[in-house]
Amino acid sequence: MQNQQQSIQGILSIAALVCLAIGWFNLFSPDINHLLSRKVFYVLIGASFFIQAPLLTNKNFMYAMYAAAGICVVGAFLPDSSNLSALKTIGLLAGIILSMSNRSRNR
């Protein structure tokens, strides 16, 4: 079960990076690029964090990872003009920090 979760998480992360790269390199129309790199990217990253959360060894980190996942997804649906749109970036950074801190403990 854990291997399956890690595989799904890896696929979601790669798909998110593809969306981000498409936006950076402007491979499609501006609207599609914006949708993929500023919306779909954060939804996929949030889903990846959600799947990763139960794999964290520290329960406090697990709950924080769920929060980071939720913040990424909710932030993706906020308008870019909103002051709260920065939440998605905060969720992303929190999830990355939690993920990295868990890996250093597992070694």
Image (cartoon, rainbow, N blue to C red):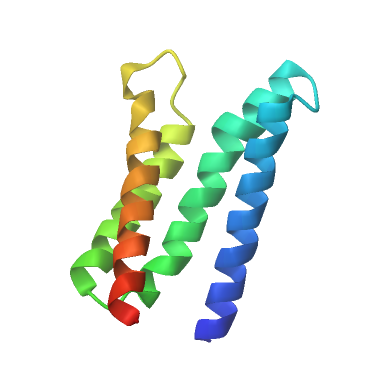
Above or below for 84 versus 76: above
* Residue drawn at (37%, 62%) of the image: 99
Residue 8 figure quarter: bottom right
**Left or right of 104 on screen, residue 41:** right
Q: How many marks?
A: 0
Residue sitting at the far right:
28
**Relative side of 10 to 32, left or right:** left
Residue 11, relative to residue 42: is it above or below? below
Residue at the far bottom: name it: 1
Q: Indicate the quadrant where residue 74 lies.
A: top left
The part of the image, by quadrant, that contains residue 86 is: top left
- 24, 64: nearer the viewer: 24
Where, quadrant-wise, is the C terminus in this rendering? bottom left
Which percent across, then down, holds residue 71? 35, 43
Question: In the image, what residue occupies the spot 80% across and 25% down?
Answer: 28
74, above or below 97, in the image:
above
Q: Residue at x 32, y 54 (%)?
A: 97
Residue 88 picture location, percent across and down: 40, 36
Q: Residue 26: percent from the left, percent from the top?
A: 74, 24
User: Residue at (25%, 63%) from the top-left corner?
Assistant: 63
Vertical arrangement, residue 84 with respect to residue 63, above or below:
above
Q: Position of residue 9 (x, y in %)?
A: 55, 66
Q: Residue furthest top?
A: 81
